[in-house]
Amino acid sequence: MFTLTSTPITFVGLLILFAWSLVWSVRDAIKAPTVVTKISTWVHVVMAVTMILMVPKSWWKPLVSAIGGPTTPVVIFAICTAWMVFMAAWRSSWSSWGHAAMFAAMAWHLAAMRKMSSVMTASKHSGMGTMNHGGMDHGMNHGGMGHGMNGSMDHGMQTAMNTAMHDFAVVGIPLMVALLALAIAGLCRAISGKAENPRKVPTCHVVATEPLAIRLSGLADFAMTFGMFWMSTGLLTPVMPFMAHLHP
């Protein structure tokens, strides 16, 4: 989670990226030609909305409380990931598997947030670790998911958090690589105007064929995947500490 005062560039940048991905996902959902594609594209809409809600602390925390806690979104996106994997297996293409990896990255991100929250709650109850700059909640939320693990906690709490999140960080590396690859592919499509391979048409989204639509579709793919990559960098700090500084 981010705030306009502590991380203004990240806060505004992520909202712009996710807003554009939402607009294009809704457009795809409306234009989807089959029931299967409609389901897949509406799943993309759900993810875009969720990512927007994850940016501001003031939106995400009340939502999670209202839906029964941090486990609920993890379960929802685990189901969405299973659907996208099924779609990719049914009509395999680079794009289909890429979108499946994107949903897997979303489920991973939410699961890591859930773990981080539980570690902080347990540490708070045990009295372990005192926070600088205004307490434990500030450390978790300052600069986004995981960004506060470095610099806002005392040494003992930071060590405990890094240890608890290490495995999540390791698992997240290939998912983050996949997100970055998808972002680059989308940006290249937006610049070149080259359509996706018509012989490998995926069922997870509407494939653009008109020149302008191809570029806008590529830009939407870039917005969604790069935004997810950027938002998730703080979760890799246990193995890549420099990632903690990517949320200005």
Image (tube, grey):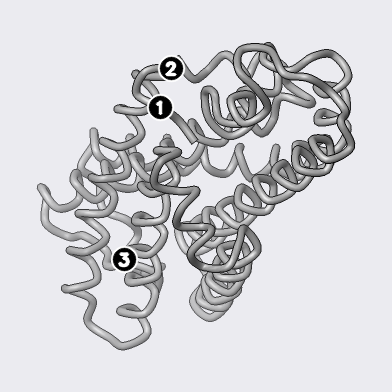
Marks 2 and 1 close (CB-CB < 8 Å): yes
Dot 2 or dot 3: first in sequence order is 2
* Disc nearest the viewer among 2 and 3: 2
Front-most of residues 158 and 230 = 158
Identity of the residue drawn at 78% across and 19% down: 130
Residues packed near mark 3 inside 10 Å, few (<14), some (14 to 19) or many (20 plus): few
Residue 158 is left or right of residue 77, and the answer is: right
What amino acid type should be assigned to the residue bearing mark 3?
A: Pro
Residues packed near mark 2 inside 10 Å, few (<14), some (14 to 19) or many (20 plus): some
Measuring from the top left, give residue 89's x and y in whole percent: 58, 76
What amino acid type should be assigned to the residue bearing mark 2?
A: Ser
Whether 24 is drawn above or below 226: the answer is below
Identity of the residue drawn at 69% across and 46% down: 112
Structural distance between the alpha carbons of marks 2 and 1: 6 Å
Q: Which residue is mark 2?
A: 6
SS of the residue under disc 3: helix
Structural distance between the alpha carbons of marks 2 and 3: 45 Å
SS of the residue under disc 2: loop
Q: Which residue is mark 3?
A: 198
SS of the residue under disc 1: loop
Identity of the residue drawn at 21% across and 60% down: 208
Dot 3 or dot 1: first in sequence order is 1
Quadrant that contains the C terminus: top left
Q: Which residue is mark 1?
A: 3
What amino acid type should be assigned to the residue bearing mark 1?
A: Thr
- The mark found on residue 108 in the picture is none
Whether 98 is drawn above or below 202: the answer is above
Residue 78 figure quarter: bottom right
* Disc nearest the viewer among 3 and 1: 1
Measuring from the top left, give residue 17's x and y in whole percent: 30, 38
